[in-house]
Each structure stands twice: as structure tokens, then as C-alpha cells.
Image (spheres, rainbow, N blue to C red):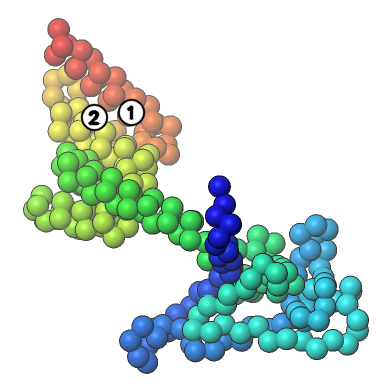
Amino acid sequence: MKDLGKEEVVKPVVFKLIKKRLAPATENNYYPGVKRIPSQDEVTDPNTGKKRIIRYSRSEQSIFKDEQPQKIVLDDIIFSNGALRVYEDNNTLLEFLRLCNWNRDNKNKVRGKEPLFYEHNPKQVAEEANQLMEAKIDAAYQAKTMEFDKLRAVARALKVNTGRSAQEIRHDVMVFAQDRPEDFLQALDNPQVRRRVEIQEAIELDLMRAEPKAILKVNANGNGEIACPVPVGIDPVDHAVKWTMTDPEGEAFMEEVQDTRKKLEENLDK
């Protein structure tokens, strides 16, 4: 129930500049003190899809030039310390800011024009912050608990140096997961990463071999038969991943390896 003894607080819509100063002159002075954006622009009308010119003037009811007198006085649009606060009763300024090409959130923005500002949405900011926090927690847990073979495969996909100790590799992957959790989690679902893990596990089970000059198929006697040559200077596991995912012969080879592994595991369970 609304408290009649208190007036409802009217909050403004806040627009914020995108670019910050790389080296603030003073502490917390991240934006220019004053930033003026043009009060006229050619935009795409979201209702008709046609190009129209918009102009901002406090004395006009419409922002569209073809609905205004030929001569009008344009008003300044100024961001102060990186922000511009506009109340809902200033409909023309709100409409101009939301429709102009300098607004990053404008879905009908004309290509080639660099956005200068965005509409600040506290709820969206909080949701994005929560999502990022959850992603960091998930990524850190995955990087900490993942089996090393899979971790090494993910590390290679992320271009992390794998020519070091297991602890060093895991450390760097955990740092990557903290700094770029979304990229890390996407790598876990990457088909190439999954194939790399399959190949490394097959190598450890001696179902196949990836040697500097060739990918080998291991027969029942434990002898290696050349299945595919490896180009000079190419990592054999990298080549095996590509070959088994893009070449019909490689795909058939990997299916046979997987079938052999499945039968091996079934025999162990008996």
C-alpha cells in the first residue's frame, strides 16, 4: 500500500559515456568533465525502416525534422563527468538519445558510426555481475578439479604452454579461468577439445599412437600400422585432432578406435 505521507521519488534515466580516460588527470576522474554530442543525426526510423533526420530542441514536440518547422534552435546535449540524467517528462530528449546512432543500445543503429554512450540499467548491471561471478566460481572449480589429461587438452586449446610441470599448467589454466571464465567454459564444450581428450586417452591405452612422422593404428599384436602421415613441424596430436574431424578416413579411423576401446572396457567389466 502506498504511503500517502511520502512523495514518490522520481528517478532519472541515466546515460553513460563508453570511453574512459586512459590516464585520469586526478584520482577517479575517469571521464572528461564535459562531453557534447551532436543534436542532429540521420537515423533509421524503427517503425518504417526509412532514413529520417532527427533534431533535438526543447521547444519542439517531435524530434523528426519533417515534423518540425524549417528553422529551429537546437539545444545542447551535454554529458557531465561521463553521465547525462534525463527525467521521463523530457520525452523529446529521451527519444532522441534512444534513437540516435551514438547510442550503443540502439538496435537500428546505422553501420559505421561509433557508439559514444549507453543507457545505464542497474538491474541489468547487477544480473550481468551475478552471472560473471557464477561463471568465475564454476570455471575455478572446473580448473581445480579437472583430470589432468583433460586439463592439458583444454590448456592447448587456450594456447597455454603445456611444456612444463602439471602444477604449472594447472596454475596457468586456473588463472585463465578466473580472468576469462566464459572463454574457459566455452573451451570445455569445444568439440575439438573433446576430441583431443579422446585421442590422448586412446594413446594412453595404446589403441593408437601419435608420432612425429605418422598417426599409427595399433593392431591386436601391439604393432603400429601407419594410418596417416604427419606434416613436418606439426604437432602429431594437433594433426590427429584435425584429421579425425575433417577427413572421412580420419573419421572412420577414430570410430574404429572408439569401438576397440568400448570392447576393451566391456571385457574389463566382465
Give, as a three-letter code, the residue at label 1.
Answer: Phe
Q: Residues within 10 Å of mark 1 (few under 14, many from 20)?
A: some
Q: Which residue is mark 2?
A: 217
Residue 240, horizontal then vertical, whole percent:
30, 40
Residue 66 horizontal side relative to residue 266, left or right: right
Label 2: element kind: strand
Give, as a three-letter code, the residue at label 2.
Answer: Lys
Question: Among all residues in the image, which is located at the extreme top?
Answer: 270
Instruction: Return the residue nearer the eye: 194 or 118.
Output: 118
Residue 173 horizontal side relative to residue 133, left or right: left
Q: Are marks 2 and 1 in contact (CB under 8 Å)?
A: yes
Q: Which residue is mark 1?
A: 253
- Whole-angstrom CA distance, mark 2 to mark 1, is 8 Å
Residue 138, horizontal then vertical, whole percent:
28, 45
Question: Among all residues in the image, which is located at the extreme front?
Answer: 5
For residue 94, above or below residue 3? below
